[in-house]
C-alpha cells in the first residue's frame, strides 16, 4: 500500500513485540508506508491515514450509504470513529518506544449532517497536552471545502507496556 492510498487488504493486528520495538511515530510511519498493516476498522469504514507528524495525524474517508442511520444521514458512530482515530494517533505519535495508551474518554460535537453526497472528508487530530501519565488531543472533521462538520476532544491514559 502506498502512503495515502485507500484502505486495502493490508490490515491486521500487529504483534506486541513489533509494537513495543519502535516509537509511536515510527510505528505510524511504518503503517503509512505499508510496511505494517493498518487496523481492520479502517477497511470496515473505508478510511485511511494520509499524514502523520509528531503530535498530529490526518485521516480521509468518503461517507457512503452503507453508513446511514434510519433517517438517511451518516451515523454519528462513523464521525466518532474518524475523530477518535485521528486524535488517538496524534497522541500515539508522541510516545516513546515501549509506551502504550488508551482512550479514557472523548466528546464529539456534531455540527452538520453527512450523506453520501458530502464527498471526501478529512479528520485531523492534534495533541493539546502530553504528560507522563496522560494526554489530551483535539480533532476536526471537515468536508472537501474545509467546512467544519464535527469536532472532538479526548483524554488518554499513558502507560508502559
Image (cartoon, helix red, strand yellow):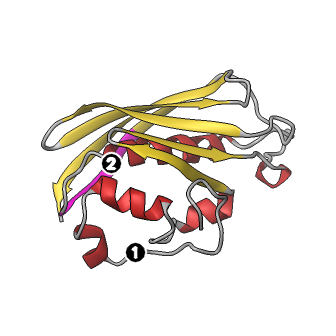
Is residue 74 toward the left or the right of residue 20 in the image? right
Q: Which residues are magenta?
A: 98-105
- Seen from the viewer's position, the closer of residues 88 and 30 is 30
At x 21% / y 49%, what residue is drawn?
Answer: 158
- Seen from the viewer's position, the closer of residues 111 and 69 is 111
In the rendered view, tell whether residue 140 sits above or below residue 64: above
At x 45% / y 36%, what residue is drawn?
Answer: 125
At x 87% / y 37%, what residue is drawn?
Answer: 117
Which label sits on residue 148?
Answer: none
Residue occupied by mark 2 = 93
Question: Cα distance, mark 2 to mark 1?
Answer: 16 Å
Rendering coords of residue 110 (x, y %) = 63, 27
At x 80% / y 38%, what residue is drawn?
Answer: 119
Give the quadrant of residue 44. Answer: bottom right
Rendering coords of residue 73 (x, y %) = 81, 38
Rendering coords of residue 35 (x, y %) = 46, 71
In the rendered view, tell whether residue 159 sits above or below residue 14: above
Residue occupied by mark 1 = 14
In the rendered view, tell whether residue 15 sits above or below residue 84: below
- Seen from the viewer's position, the closer of residues 115 and 58 is 58
Rendering coords of residue 56 (x, y %) = 40, 38
Looking at marks 2 and 1 on the same chain, the residue that comes earlier in the sequence is marked by 1
Is residue 121 toward the left or the right of residue 21 in the image? right
Q: Is residue 94 magenta?
A: no
Is residue 105 toward the left or the right of residue 41 in the image? left
Amino acid at each position: 500500500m502506498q502512503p495515502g492510498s485507500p484502505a486495502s487488504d493490508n490490515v491486521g493486528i500487529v504483534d506486541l513485540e513489533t509494537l513495543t520495538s519502535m516509537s509511536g511515530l515510527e510505528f505510524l510511519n511504518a503503517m503509512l508506508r505499508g510496511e505494517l498493516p493498518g487496523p481492520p476498522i479502517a477497511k470496515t469504514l473505508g478510511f485511511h491515514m494520509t499524514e502523520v507528524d509528531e503530535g498530529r495525524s490526518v485521516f480521509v474517508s468518503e461517507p457512503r450509504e452503507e453508513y446511514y442511520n434510519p433517517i438517511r444521514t451518516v451515523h454519528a458512530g462513523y464521525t466518532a470513529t474518524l475523530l477518535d482515530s485521528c486524535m488517538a494517533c496524534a497522541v500515539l505519535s508522541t510516545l516513546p518506544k515501549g509506551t502504550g495508551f488508551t482512550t479514557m474518554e472523548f466528546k464529539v460535537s456534531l455540527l452538520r449532517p453527512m450523506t453520501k453526497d458530502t464527498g471526501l472528508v478529512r479528520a485531523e487530530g492534534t495533541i493539546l497536552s502530553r504528560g507522563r501519565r496522560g494526554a489530551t488531543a483535539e480533532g476536526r472533521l471537515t468536508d472537501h471545502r474545509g467546512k467544519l462538520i464535527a469536532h472532538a476532544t479526548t483524554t488518554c491514559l499513558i502507560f508502559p507496556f
